[in-house]
Amino acid sequence: MAGNREPLNRVARRVGWLVLLVVLVARQADSRPAPLALLAAVAVAWTVWVVAQWRGRRDVVLATLLVLGAAGGVLAFWASIGIAAFAAVSIAAASGFELPAAVAIAAVGPVTLAISTLAGDGGTATVAAGAAVALAGFIGGLSRRQAEERARSKAELAVAQERTALAREVHDVLAHTLGAVSMQLEALDALLESGAATERLRSTLARARGLVNDGIGEAHTAVRALRDDPVQLDERVRELVAGTPITLSLVGTPRPLPPAAGVGLLRAAQEAITNVRKHAPGAAASITISYTDDETVLTVTNEAPAAPARERTLGGYGLQGMRERIELAGGRVTAAPSDEGWTVQATVPA
């Protein structure tokens, strides 16, 4: 099955090296038929290899590298410049195949040259040079493979981080909006059962509709944050608590925050409010944003519920996502019981 194609600039370099090899070997061969025939075999094998590598045909690449190594090994017996083919074979083997197979492929050329030299009473200098060229090419191929793997790992990490950021945004927007809408629908159901007046039903429906519109706005905010727009945290939190009994206090001078820090604190506020509704319905709550020279601190506090609520931990997806988001911004999160009831505090260096 075809794989990813090679970059065209790499293909062009290989064609250039082939042309140079053909010219140099042809000059050294002095029109002798045997080396010229081998040169033709090397040229054909090299061309097929380049095309197969570009098209991602791994099986054809393997076959042509074996042919190229063997033909180059015999050719180098007559024209020592033929050992240049060893470098190409070794680089391709080390960068494209697992280590045992790569070693075997790279060794074909030097072994063939050694056999040809022994059979033809040649000197050992060319064999040593061929082995050195093959080894140098092999090391170069390994280095290139490691560099490509590092680049691929960085790209995969970047994609994973983007997916995680998107997952957090989807969770935070949907959890807050749908949680609030769910409460309004429950209230609407209770009103219907009690036979409440039409105006009260319409009012509850209007609040639910407003929450949906707020959710759409939050989705737009998430998109802006992913585009690295600064966040005016105090304005966004003020919109968040509008129409609720939650109070907002500011300490220090408000300022726009970097996207990671601003969105992290905004989502922390949303998650904390969602948890207040879930674990302490009806309890009084307050939000304080403190701006200092080096940090911005968001504190959400709620009174203890009238009825005992489940103990909260940092194990839920929402609080876990809050902590991950704040830590990515270089900050920290604490969530624990307090004298007032329960306190969540998120701090970022901004």
Image: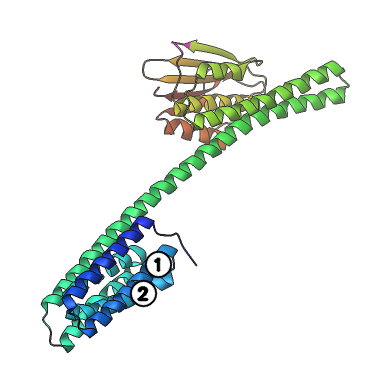
Q: To which residue does mark 1 refer?
A: 51
Q: Which of 44 and 59 is in front in this view?
A: 44
**Viewport quadrant of the C terminus:** top left
**Which residue sits at x=33%, y=76%?**
66
Would residue 309 be seen by someone viewing this image from the given angle?
Answer: no
How are the residues colored? Answer: rainbow
Q: Which amino acid does label 2 sit on?
A: Thr
**Which residue sits at x=15%, y=72%?**
129
- Residue 305 in percent (x, y) is at 64, 22
Would residue 2 be seen by someone viewing this image from the given angle?
Answer: yes
Relative horizontal placement of residue 67, taking residue 76 as reference (left or right): right
Q: Is residue 90 magenta?
A: no
The magenta span reads 251-255
**Residue depth check, mark 2 versus mark 1: number of the one nearer the observer:** 1
Q: Which mark is residue 259?
A: none
**Which residue sits at x=34%, y=58%?**
10
Q: Residue 64 carries which label?
A: 2
User: Which quarter of the picture shows residue 138?
Assistant: bottom left
- Residue 284 in percent (x, y) is at 62, 16
Which circle's residue, 2 or 1, is located before the other in the chain?
1
